[in-house]
């Protein structure tokens, strides 16, 4: 059992999830199809089907199971994991994570940025190919707008403000609109990787009046700046934060390979592949769009999920409950149509304790370290795993110190 030093108390981590796919008939669960990246990370490479069965769909449409819909599809506002998943197809980022090597790699940049010796700035150059849906090219002005819009005090993204706080300014190269310098306030290990979390926005689409161009980075960095006293900034923010950029299909834009074609609340979100998208000539697997459509089908009920897979309504999922998949794996028809297995993931389960109670609304139950230690030692972690997850989850070390180190 591990205990952290601050407000989170990690009991156990669930490191297994479920992946199913109907892209292949052969079920090969031997170690030969596991590609090892490190001692703890494996990736699966499943062989293609040797034949196409008569009852398999020939439509080039992927129907993927999910248990929730996005809260918003706004480029800066919103926090749901489904929003993040969809953005991998509709948006693009300066930096991306290579899931095969677990290293960061250039996304919209030509190459990885060149860091200054003092660690306070780095030079970037955008790729030549990326174009917005209206045909205009991606430029450094789009990067500048993205940063200003994210840092603006009136933008409704409180969850993201701390990520942008250390960015001081963007300096665009006067002779090349593709080049710019990022200047940070202090050296920090996340000064580069945070770009992988926030999509680049089209300035001319979200700021037709060029309102943000009239404000400086120093103003957005100044906590004393009264943004709400500028009528022009208030007008821009009211429109930018409005629901049209969050839910209306005509305003859900991005530089990615897919666009949002439909959103049926509580039922599905449909993405459609863009025709003649600039990435067609790309050789990157992260810029290859195979399906004509990707449909995220929302289904929260385990029994209904099992029925959908038996009827081949769904093509894949990584959110099936352990019990549901184990039951499906006893069905020969399911095994004929799908590959399925338990595989490592980055998900975890934990118990969080309020370590900053006010003593009025939240009593001081957990401020005594002896109480926290007792909770840790009394929790039957292994039994919980056996009962709830059929022993398929892996107990892992959380952040913080070991119990015996923390309380000796």
Image (cartoon, rainbow, N blue to C red):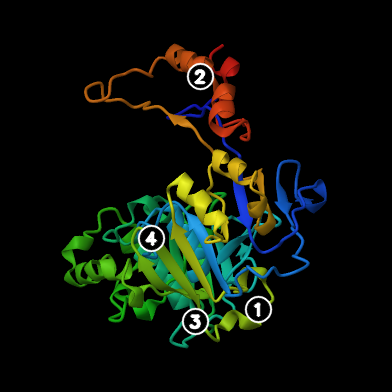
Residue at image mark 4: 267
What element does badge 4 sit on? loop
Separation of disc 1 and disc 4 at Cα?
33 Å
The answer to which of 396 and 380 lies nearer the viewer is 380
Is residue 49 toward the left or the right of residue 342 in the image?
right
Q: Which residue is mark 2?
A: 379
Residue 128 appears anywhere in the view = no
> Where does the image place residue 161, in percent across and percent down from the top left?
37, 53
| Disc marking residue 174 | 3
Residue 37 lies, in percent from the top left, at: 75, 50
Residue 282, which numbered label? 1
**Residue lying at 56% horizontally and 54% vertically, measured from the top left:** 310
Query: Quick one: label 3 or label 1, which is nearer the N terminus?
Result: 3
Asked whether disc 4 touches disc 3, contact meaning CB atoms under 8 Å apart, the reply is: no
Q: Is 103 left, or right, of 322 in this rendering?
A: right
Q: Residues within 10 Å of mark 1 (few under 14, many from 20)?
A: few
Which is more N-terminal, label 2 or label 4?
Answer: 4
SS of the residue under disc 3: loop
Alpha carbon separation for disc pair 3 and 1:
29 Å
Element on which disc 1 rests:
loop
59 or 102, which lies in front?
A: 59
How far apart are the two marked residues, 2 and 1, measured between alpha carbons? 51 Å
* Residue sitting at x 59%, y 17%: 405
If you read the primary sequence from the N terminus, does the residue marked by circle 4 or circle 3 appear first?
A: 3
Q: Dot 3, how many residues are within 10 Å of its Cα: few (below 14), some (14-19), or many (20+)? A: few
Give the residue drawn at x 61%, y 72%. Answer: 287
Instruction: Please tell me which of labels 2 and 3 falls first in the chain.
Output: 3
Q: CA distance from mark 2 to mark 3?
A: 61 Å
Closer to the camera in the image, 35 or 393: 393
Which dot, 2 or 1, sits closer to the camera? 2
Q: Quadrant of the N terminus?
A: top right
């Amino acid at each position: 059992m591990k205990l952290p030093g601050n407000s989170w108390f990690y009991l156990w981590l669930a490191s297994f999830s479920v992946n199913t796919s109907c892209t292949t008939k052969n079920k090969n669960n031997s170690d030969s199809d596991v590609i090892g990246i490190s001692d703890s990370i494996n990736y699966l490479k499943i062989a293609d089907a040797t034949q196409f069965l008569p009852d398999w769909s020939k439509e080039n449409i992927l129907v993927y199971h999910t248990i929730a819909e996005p809260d918003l599809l706004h480029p800066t506002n919103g926090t749901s994991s489904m929003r993040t998943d969809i953005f991998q197809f509709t948006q693009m980022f300066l930096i991306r994570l290579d899931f095969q090597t677990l290293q960061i790699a250039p996304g919209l940049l030509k190459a990885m940025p060149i860091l200054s010796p003092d660690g306070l700035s780095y030079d970037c150059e955008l790729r030549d190919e990326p174009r917005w849906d209206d045909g205009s090219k991606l430029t450094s002005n789009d990067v500048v707008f993205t940063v200003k819009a994210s840092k603006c005090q009136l933008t409704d993204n409180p969850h993201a403000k701390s990520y942008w706080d250390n960015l001081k300014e963007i300096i665009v190269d006067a002779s090349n609109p593709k080049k710019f310098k990022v200047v940070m306030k202090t050296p920090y290990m996340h000064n580069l990787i945070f770009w992988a979390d926030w999509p680049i926005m089209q300035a001319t689409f979200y700021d037709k009046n060029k309102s943000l161009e009239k404000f400086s980075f120093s103003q957005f960095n100044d906590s004393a700046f009264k943004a709400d006293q500028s009528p022009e900034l208030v007008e821009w923010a009211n429109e930018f934060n409005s629901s049209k950029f969050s839910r209306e299909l005509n305003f859900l834009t991005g530089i990615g390979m897919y666009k949002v074609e439909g959103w049926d609340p509580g039922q599905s979100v449909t993405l459609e592949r863009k025709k003649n998208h600039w990435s067609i000539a790309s050789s990157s697997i992260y810029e290859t769009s195979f399906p004509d459509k990707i449909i995220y089908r929302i289904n929260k009920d385990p029994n209904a999920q099992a029925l959908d897979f038996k009827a081949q309504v769904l093509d894949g999922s990584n959110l099936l409950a352990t019990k549901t998949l184990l039951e499906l794996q006893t069905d020969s028809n399911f095994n004929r149509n799908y590959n399925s297995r338990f595989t490592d993931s980055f998900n975890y389960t934990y118990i969080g304790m309020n370590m900053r109670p006010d003593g009025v609304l939240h009593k001081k139950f957990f401020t005594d370290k002896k109480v926290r230690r007792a909770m840790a030692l009394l929790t039957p972690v292994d039994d919980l795993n056996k009962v709830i997850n059929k022993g398929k989850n892996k107990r892992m070390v959380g952040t913080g110190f070991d119990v015996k180190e923390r309380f000796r």
